Structures are given as structure tokens and as C-alpha cells.
Image: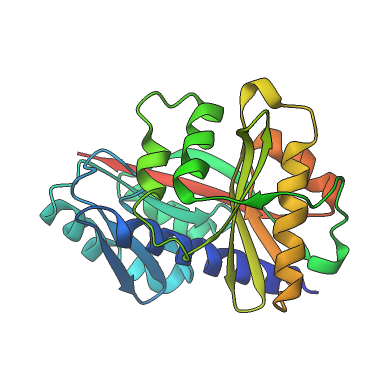
Amino acid sequence: MDDAILRARLWDGFARLQALLGGHAAGGAVVEMPGLTGSVVPRALDSPTLNAIVVQDAEHAMAQLADVEAMFQHAGVRRWGVWVEGEARAATNVLRKSGLSMTAASPGMGAEIEAVEPLGGDDADPADLQIVGKVNDLAYGNRDHRLERTLSPLPPNALNAYRVDKRGRAKAVALALHHGEDCGVSFVATTPDARRQGLAARVMAKALKDARAVGCTTTTLQATEVGERLYKALGYRHLCSMELWEKRR
């Protein structure tokens, strides 16, 4: 499959996830303008990930940038972000000239789902979203429980959630969003005490098995630098750089 199709599915799924997170956060709202999807969460005034737009069509999205900024200002948001493909240089130049700074960059990855080779068993169990958030907070050292608080308000059936336990406690988790023919994987995490035991590969294997069963033909995700090695081993390939550009008041 052409990488351009995978990139389009990656960004479409990422935009849908952004809308889910913002739309169900306390006081949140979904933003849809030509070329972009995002969310505004006034109760999280300093969160550039909840208060963010995802650029799906750079030319159209950049034409809306002044309206986007006015929207966040009207909501009283102090920090907001724009997720954009790093290779879209015309768009990133506009963001830079508009006073935004690039604060994060992650590999966007994807693959034909039949090309992904599981590295472990597919014996993961269903999970609730609160547990997925809790394990992510433990994995990333978030003492404020920000990811647990972000995921907990979502409807239970909004995403497919998975966990692998050891000694009765969830140690590795993942989410999967089925949109069209793509399975967008996110929030993959393993607690620090259970790393390098193949647990993340097991939750991935179960997520992709279920995705195949409902007719998904591709899978995409945003990786961390550490996670990129796992995903390459599974069969994912690099598609683009996913950059977060931030504006602070």
C-alpha cells in the first residue's frame, strides 16, 4: 500500500482520537474547521494536548489559524497546540511566523495489518479506560494522574482497551480506535517494574487480532523514541514526523 494512504489514515485516526479526548473532557468541545479537527477544554487551561488541533490538510488548516487562535483566547486557554506533519514545511513556517514553537516530535508509523508479525501471545484481556490511564501515568511518571483523568470520562465503548496482568495487577495496556479500515493504536504503556518482558507486544497482538476480525486492513500509531524499536520489530514503518507546535499566553 502507498505510504500516502497510510499517512492519511494515521492523521484521520489521530484527529478522531483528539476529538474524543476533548469532546468528553469536563467542559470540553470539539472543533471542526476546513482542514483540521481539534478540541477546546477550558478547564485544562495549560494543557496543549487537550487544547489542540490536528492538521489534516495543511493548506486549508493554515488559512484558519487566526480563527483558531481567537477561539482559544476567547476560551481563556493559556497554552494550546497544533499537531502537524513535520515534513509540511510551508505549514510549519506559518506556525513559526505566528509565534508558535515546536515542543515535541514523534514518529508516525503504519503498516498493512497482515504485514505485522506479533512477537508474543495474544492473551491480553479487556481493560477499562481508567486502568489504561493509570498504567500510562505510572509509565510516564505523572504524579497528577493526568492521563487517568483524561481517559476516565470517555464512553466505555469509545475505544477498544487491553491489559496484561502480573500478580493480579495491570502491567501493560493499549487502546485501539477502529476507523474505516484502519486500527489506530495509542496509549501503549508498561509499568517500570514490568518492562523488557514482552508485555507490550502481547497487548499489541491482541489489539491487532481483534482489528483483523472486524475488517481493518491497516494499522497506524504515534510512537515514542523507545517504542519505535518495538513497532519496527513488529513490522511498522516510519511514515512521517508528528510535531506539536505550541502557543503560550
Q: Nearer the viewer, residue 63 or 31?
A: 31
Q: Residue furthest front?
A: 168
Place of residue 167 in the rendered image (x, y in percent of width and height, measured from the top left) = 67, 28
Camera sees residue 68: yes
On screen, residue 193 above or below 96: above
Q: Quadrant of the C terminus?
A: top left
Q: Is residue 58 left or right of residue 178?
A: left
Q: Residue furthest top?
A: 193
Total labels: the figure holds 0
Q: Quadrant of the N terminus?
A: bottom right
Place of residue 197 in the rendered image (x, y in percent of width and height, measured from the top left) = 79, 29
Q: Nearer the viewer, residue 223 or 245?
A: 223
On screen, residue 93 above or below 171: below
Res 177 → quadrant: bottom right
- Seen at 48% across and 66% down, the residue is 157
**What kind of colouring is applied to the model shown?**
rainbow
Camera sees residue 96: no
- Seen at 43% across and 27% down, the residue is 142
On screen, residue 39 above or below 106: below
Res 28 → quadrant: bottom left
Q: Is residue 37 left or right of residue 223?
A: left
- Seen at 77% across and 50% down, the residue is 123
Place of residue 186 in the rendered image (x, y in percent of width and height, measured from the top left) = 58, 51
Q: Nearer the viewer, residue 202 or 243?
A: 202
Q: Is residue 59 left or right of residue 202?
A: left
